[in-house]
Image (cartoon, rainbow, N blue to C red):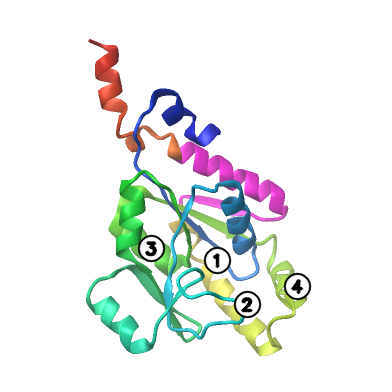
Amino acid sequence: MLENALSDRHDLKRRGVLFVLSSPSGAGKSTIARKLLADEPELGVSVSATTRPMRPGEVDGKDYHFVDLEEFRRMAADHEFLEWAHVFDNRYGTPHAPVDAMLDAGQDVLFDIDWQGAQQLHQIAGGDVVRVFILPPSMPELRDRLVKRATDSVEVIDARMARAANEVSHWDGYDYVLVNDDVERCFRDVKTILNAERLKRSRQTGLIGFIRKLTR
């Protein structure tokens, strides 16, 4: 595959990418994340810890690590999170250890987090982080998508729209900003970004040794 071409051809080691997707609820982030995981079987996933109740069909340790508030506070106090945030009266956080292990092994890790988490992650992990923000075509279109999902009350949709306006205001904290007016095209753009970031010189940790062999 294109994204692994350099490493496959020359057996060059590289450091993984912490690939962040953020968007307002309903803008298509989760759909694109699912498509990316289906297309990239070796892409790692950051499994967040959360205090929210488990929903039907969810699996502890796969969808989220479900913990109570006391345990979440302990993890935060012990600096076990790369990032954490309050979202709709619940708390979500990314455990540090499994992400570090994947990154050091050269595995890319996908993050489905909001702007607060993206900001914290960038402050901690810096150059390993690539941040992509996905915008809806318009706010009326976003509301229409939320209504058509038929999973939330009018009150919840109103709250999501208010939150969406706040989230959109943080667009300039991202490396890439895409408008999702066509999910397939937006997905292709996300793939292009990931491929390019994987091939950056700064991530090719085996490149120096390869160059030395060339110039002997």
In the depicted structure, whether residue 135 falls above or below residue 40: below
> Mark 4 or mark 2, which has the lower sequence index?
4
Q: CA distance from mark 4 to mark 2?
A: 11 Å
Residue 213 in which image quadrant: top left
> Mark 4 or mark 3, which has the lower sequence index?
3
Find residue 144 and name its label.
4
- Residue 190 in the image: x percent, y percent? 57, 47
Find residue 161 and name its label.
2
Q: Quick one: label 4, few (<14), some, or many (20+) residues within 10 Å?
A: few
Is label 3 in contact with label 2 (beta carbons under 8 Å)? no
User: For the magenta stretch, what is the residue range?
Assistant: 175-197
Residue located beneath label 1 in the image: 168
> Mark 1 or mark 2, which has the lower sequence index?
2
Q: CA distance from mark 3 to mark 2?
A: 21 Å
Of helix, strand and loop, which one carries label 4?
helix
Q: CA distance from mark 1 to mark 2?
A: 10 Å
Residue found farthest to the top: 216
Residue 173 in which image quadrant: bottom left
Residue located beneath label 3 in the image: 119
> Mark 1 or mark 4, which has the lower sequence index?
4
Q: What secondary structure predominates along the stretch shown in magenta? A: helix
Q: CA distance from mark 1 to mark 3?
A: 14 Å
